[in-house]
Amino acid sequence: MIGAKAFELSGSLVRVSHAVMALAMVAALPACAAPTQDRPAAPGQNAAGQADAASTTAHPQDWAKPALPATRNATVEKTVADLLARMSLEQKVGQVVQADIASVTPEDVYRYHLGSVLNGGNSKPGEGHHVTAPAWVAAADAFYEASMRPNGKLPRIPVIWGSDAVHGHNNVVGATLFPHNIGLGAARNPELMRRIGAVTAAEMRVTGLDWTFAPTLAVVRDDRWGRTYEGFGENPEIATSYARPLIEGLQGKVGAADWLRGGHIIATAKHFLGDGGTAGGKDQGDTRTDEATLRRLFAAPYVPAIEAGVQSIMVSFSSWNGAKMHGNRSLLRGVIKDHWGFDGFLVGDWNGHGQVDGCKPDNCYQTFVAGLDMAMAPDSWKGLWQNTLAQAKDGRLPMPVLDDAVRRILRVKVRAGLMEAGKPSSRPLAGQYDLLGSAEHRAVAREAVRQSLVLLKNAGSTLPLKPGARILLAGDGADNMTKQTGGWTLTWQGTGTTRADFPNGETIAEGMRAVAKQVGATVDVAANGAFTQKPDVAVVVFGEDPYAEFQGDRADVGFDDAQGSLALLKKLKAAGVPTVAVFLSGRPMWVNPYLNTADAFVAAWLPGSEGGGVADVLFGKSDFRGKLPYSWPRTSDQTAVNVGDADYNPLFPYGFGLTLKDRGELAPLPEDRATQASGDRTILFDAGRAGAGRRLLIGAPGELSPNPGPDLITARGADRRAQEDSVRLVWTGKAKAEAAIVDNAPVDLMRETNGALAVEIDLKVDGAPSRPVTAGVACGDQCAGSVPITAPLRAAPKGAWTTLTIPLSCFAAAGADMRQISAPLSLTTDGTLDLTISRARLVQANGAGTACPNNNQ
């Protein structure tokens, strides 16, 4: 699901018994071919009966069948048939359309008979991400009551609410936050997954919700993908072994009295199919492979998911050999429904149906014909409802197709007991707010953190930290809950949060202090590594800033160190202080210089809210047991390195991980970066993020960071043409504050300046500046050039998009050294200002409107 409203997150799982089979599949990948059969070549096959690599048509008979669970019940089927017979056409269409709560009201649910709502990554039942748990329950009640309001003789059918609870109930303040899936994949513990699923289900029930878009069963093959951390690993064996226990933790066991009821919810296996195999790791891209590889590698986890009784499957944004999954009838209807016998329902992803050829978000009967049952139409729902109704009336959407989709949705609702469950606030666990982030739940999360950490280096037995030691804790991730929890945490991209948003968690610094107290050690926290008394050892916590889908896509896997973490490690080493590097990331990355410099190196992934779990392992209260779920790259351009590859040559192989008993020495590694993050260097900001090799930082001048807190300035995702394709910057006016696009390394813009290029900014002013505003560039600590832009911002029509163009020569004239630009754009004021930027880029500055701005304009 997507961000500002919602994004997809579910997946399918496979039971442990399939793990060995899945591993064998990967080992055999170079020879993947469909079995030769004694029949004429079918569409998508050559004369030898082998799958055509460019085929978009699946052959269901070649796909292994799951052993279907005993979910069918004559009473349920009779209830469903009775409801279907009494429903109006408008009701039926309403059941197959899902709207986001940011774009729909309870009254809309009643009027259009909508069968489902969701909250996207940035959609909450209130303003901002600080919404309280009771507000979630109240909203769930309001939507439910609207759906159950009498409407003539029509049957009353309760609405179902879906949410991306992908590492705990991560949209709700105070919930328990588990490590992201990449860390859970390192733990290699299926039974732990069952407990995590159960905790997540219980906490969702507390807030009145009953359906999660999880688990994600992606098998990730290119680590440039921004959703790599949502996958359990590069090999299907992990997701296959986790599918059953995770789904049973969420839903309960088929046949049990509490299946889908009590403290359990409805799960979703996602994203079907090949989401982790797109060319170049591009989000929503194209998986170019033959059918044999598609089914053996990417489909493996879905078999145990269906065997565990998963009730919904989310369809992927991605394509298979150019054909969008939301329109692939051979896979959705042919494989999942007809061949596998899956009798739950298929849900789409955020307007994903609109990407099918011939479709738009508000018009796509083709996706239902292909096999989709519920279209996720967050902001396009009304148009989709109207067009689908018309298409059902004129026959383009055949009635048997619509009835099949509605029947499947009703079946799940009846199985889950929703017809008689009453309003969400009256259901089991609802309103028991003390369960959110309870000590028992947090203990499960802390255990998961301990099991997820992977030790890559431990020269001289630097770890474990010794009792009685004086420890310096440094780095921008040391006391940073936003960084350690990652994307899909309270907001879609995981940005814009503060420590106060996590009342039931511990930062790594807080966990370190608590454990140190237990063992008689001392922990001094200084992000910049400053100390007065020389420490016995320094722990430096650093890594990637939060991101989610498509904004997390990269050009390579080299770590970009905008915070100076390597310099900090080297400074400490020069001072004779042994160092432990704790690396926070959503993927394996090329970090050779850091591995060379640090005495010990820990891959901590994105551990979630329980920083104490990191402390437990660093102090040796628990040993390292995590094993790499992804191969670790040898070079920055080794973006697709997977066990079983013919030329497999990673730095650390899949499954690697030291314990404290192992020899942890590491020979010096080459430090020359094979590639620098490539991309259009004229782009400063676009599609919701800074350009390649750049970052958006905010804060007080000289103290910029991704998330400094809301006192002076905030940066939040905003929508223009697509979800979160812009950034809204709000200055509070309490003191001078700055928003800057910062380069990872200084760039020479002298040629561009001489060539009459300009910075062009597409912006919208919602709150005019109360004090002077400047636009500038930086060229080092004591080098800058700025120009006033107060007048054009005040003259801009409120709430309307406009363009501001500033020639680079203006900055040069103001004193900037254009040969060493470290920040190609900054905006500064000490007053209030509400400004949204959708794009900033370098363009040719010829023509009118490209003079230097001044306050007389």
Image: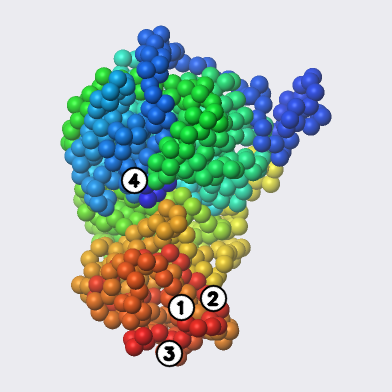
The amino acid marked with disc number 3 is Gly
> Closer to the camera: disc 1 or disc 3?
1
Instruction: Give the Cα separation between the discs numbered 3 and 2.
Output: 21 Å
Mark positioned earlier in the residue sequence (1 or 4): 4
**Residue at the (39%, 56%) spot, across then down:** 719
What residue is shown at x 41% (from left), y 89% (from top)? Answer: 814
Give percent across and percent down for residue 682. Answer: 54, 71
Query: What whole-number distance in Å separates the C-alpha atoms at marks 1 and 2?
Result: 9 Å
Q: In this view, does 349 lie above or below 304?
A: below
Dot 2: element: strand
The crowd level at tag 2 (other Cα within 10 Å; few <14, some 14-19, many 20+) is: some
Q: Distance between the residues labelled 2 and 4?
A: 36 Å
Of marks 3 and 2, which one's residue comes earlier in the chain? Answer: 3
Foreground mark, 3 or 2, reads 2
Asked which secondary structure carries label 1, the reply is: strand
Image spot of residue 786 (x, y percent): 39, 84
Assess whether mark 4 and mark 1 are in contact (beta carbons under 8 angstroms). no
Asked whether the residues under the numbered discs 3 and 2 touch, taking CB atoms below 8 Å apart as contact, a structural biologist would say no
Residue under pointer 2: 843
In the rendered image, which quarter contains the N terminus? top left
Tell me the kind of residue under disc 4: Ser
Q: Which of 574 and 678 is in front in this view?
A: 678
Determine contact: label 1, label 2, CB under 8 Å: yes
- Of the pair 204 and 756, the residue shown nearer to us: 756
Callout 2 amino acid = Val
- Residue mark closest to the camera, 2 vs 4: 4
Instruction: Please report the residue visible at 52 percent of the width from the left and 75 percent of the height from the top.
Output: 842
Which labelled disc corresponds to residue 805?
Answer: 1
